[in-house]
Amino acid sequence: MRWSQAFIPTLRDDPADAEAASHRLLVRAGYIRQLMAGSYSILPLGMRVCHKISRLVREEMDAIGAQEFLLPCLHPAELWQRSGRWERIGEEMFRLRDRRQADLALGVTHEEVFTAIACELRSYRQLPQIWYQIQSKFRDEPRPKSGLLRVREFSMKDSYSFDVDPQGLDLSFQKHFEAYRRIFSRCGVDTIAVEASSGNMGGSESIEFMVPSDAGEDWIASCGACGYAANLEKATSGVEKATSGVEKATSGAAPVPEEKAAAAGEALGAPQEFATPGVRSIEDLARFAGGAPAERQIKALVYALDGAAALVLLRGDQELAVQKLADATGAGQVRPASDAEIRAALGASAGSLGAVGVRGLRVLADRSLEGASGMWTGANRDGFHLRGVDVARDIRVDAWLDLRQAKAGEACPACEAPLAVRKTIEVGHIFKLGTRYSEALGALFLDEEQKARPIWMGSYGIGIGRAMAAVAEASHDDAGLVWPTSVAPFEVVITAIDPKRAETADAANGLYDALRARGVDTLLDDRSERPGVKFNDADLIGIPYRITVGPKGLAEGRVEWTRRRTRESRNLDLHKAPDVVAEAVIEERSLTA
């Protein structure tokens, strides 16, 4: 490709709304353009990267025996209603009606449609199967942001495995796990495989593949000692029990008389109510004279679980992992209750809530509160709290659950070493679905004894555009993108200095033809631009190798060869340059083959 004929609309300045490096650089370098919030046009350079990522994905899918399909984006509501996800997914799904008033949806994912086709797998002799596609998906994100990292329309490789039993599913799951490792390695990114919530997908187990990045929106907890890693929506950790007794009775500036502190401990025969004017938060009560540090408080939150109010209890120094609440209760829709719903349920406002004496409301408590005594909590009366609360004695708990979010420094659940917490980008997710969809949609097969049994399924996704953005996040510098050769839009850019000079044009064209003849993906910058503009653009778009052809070097029979990642340059004999550069490119390709 000749730059003078290509559409590569580079920009001098960063887009005003771009925060993530991938967003900023993919726009500036002419890879993408925003159409509206969460919707991006992929321009020619971006398409070349996406095609190369898709090629790697196809190679690895084909290697595990997968067969490629292409399914519709427009789905009838009936399939989603049969699986139960029409109502469960909620506002994330784009819904519409056709001229006949039939309910339709744009595909969030394709479990239902693939399962409908799998109904034609009628015998165990036809199993196992692995099917996949690369197709558009649509999700009505409430807050699309960060360029291609959170969008409303995107291209995804989604594959599905179909097996006769759980053991077969385990094998298909492991095949995908290993294939995903190879895909991301070949794309040039290091990933961390972490335990994850299955969310609306359902199933018994799921693993996410994460790229560490400050641009990510997923936090993971990981252990450097044993390798444990999990999304914070799933992660567990060891936590010390809250200390009882008068030594932690208050953290406020004004000391509480010793007799009152003692009365506030476990020795009280019943909780003691006391006035707390202006106290509306855990922090307020920790500062209040006669209050308590956060770990001695019971945080009470009212949540609507599929429309029904529930009271959720945690220790005051812990945060709720909302996905854990959804997974533990099986609720499809989880949200904080409104002020009106809170008052209707408990007769008080947030900031004065508690569970002592509560009846007629489901109470769910985090396990860190088990056995806790001498605690402080809201009195369900505005401006009042209780102290001396013994959880086992004073609170009726309907279920003890793991609800809190793990924190850095807490003990690893596997080896008790301290956990680290960091931000990541999710680039892949694999699920063991079990028989949820096959049972709902009637995908049954006859086993060796001619008995009808549901197919065991798995689901496996990689976002193509998000993978491109993740590589950009992991591979850039102050000057621009730094693509790995395996996914770069071009492998070599030839920068012709003063291309109107006949000797420069002849040399640059000769190199261009020679490299293409050797199978090297080459871009020839033949524009009549200043050298600084050309060098800056070459750095910005991130081509792995640059060959500079100019009058000064040609006078000595040489060209300059520069590696983008290291900025290292060397002079090459003009006539030997095609072989030297082609050999380097082929060697680098072999590292990700």
Image: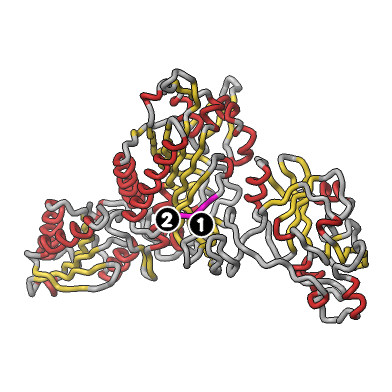
Res. 95 image quadrant: top right
Residue 479 versus residue 8: which sits nearer the camera?
479
- Residue 93 placement (x, y as % from top left): 58, 38
Q: Residues within 10 Å of mark 1 (few under 14, many from 20)?
A: many
Query: Is 14 situated above or below 251?
Result: above
**In the rendered structure, which disc, 2 or 1, sits on the residue that comes first in sequence?**
1
Q: Residues within 10 Å of mark 2 (few under 14, many from 20)?
A: many
- Residue 505 placement (x, y as % from top left): 13, 61
Magenta-span inclusion, residue 40: no
Q: Which residues are magenta?
A: 192-196
Residue 146: give its label. 1
Q: How is the image coloured?
A: secondary structure
Q: Residue at x 46, y 39 (%)?
A: 459
Residue 349 visible (yes or no): no
Determine contact: label 2, label 1, CB under 8 Å. yes
The three-letter code of the residue at mark 2 reads Ala
The three-letter code of the residue at mark 1 reads Ser
Task: For mark 1, give the secondary structure.
Answer: loop
Res. 85 image quadrant: top right
Between the C-alphas of marks 2 and 1, the distance is 9 Å
Q: Residue at x 93, y 67 (%)?
A: 275
- Residue 541 placement (x, y as % from top left): 33, 60
Q: Residue furthest front?
A: 449
Res. 217 image quadrant: bottom right
Q: Residue furthest top?
A: 450
Residue 469: give its label. 2
Q: Residue at x 44, y 43 (%)?
A: 461
Q: Is residue 545 left or right of residue 98?
A: left
Our reading of the magenta stretch's main secondary structure is strand
Q: Residue at x 88, y 68 (%)?
A: 267
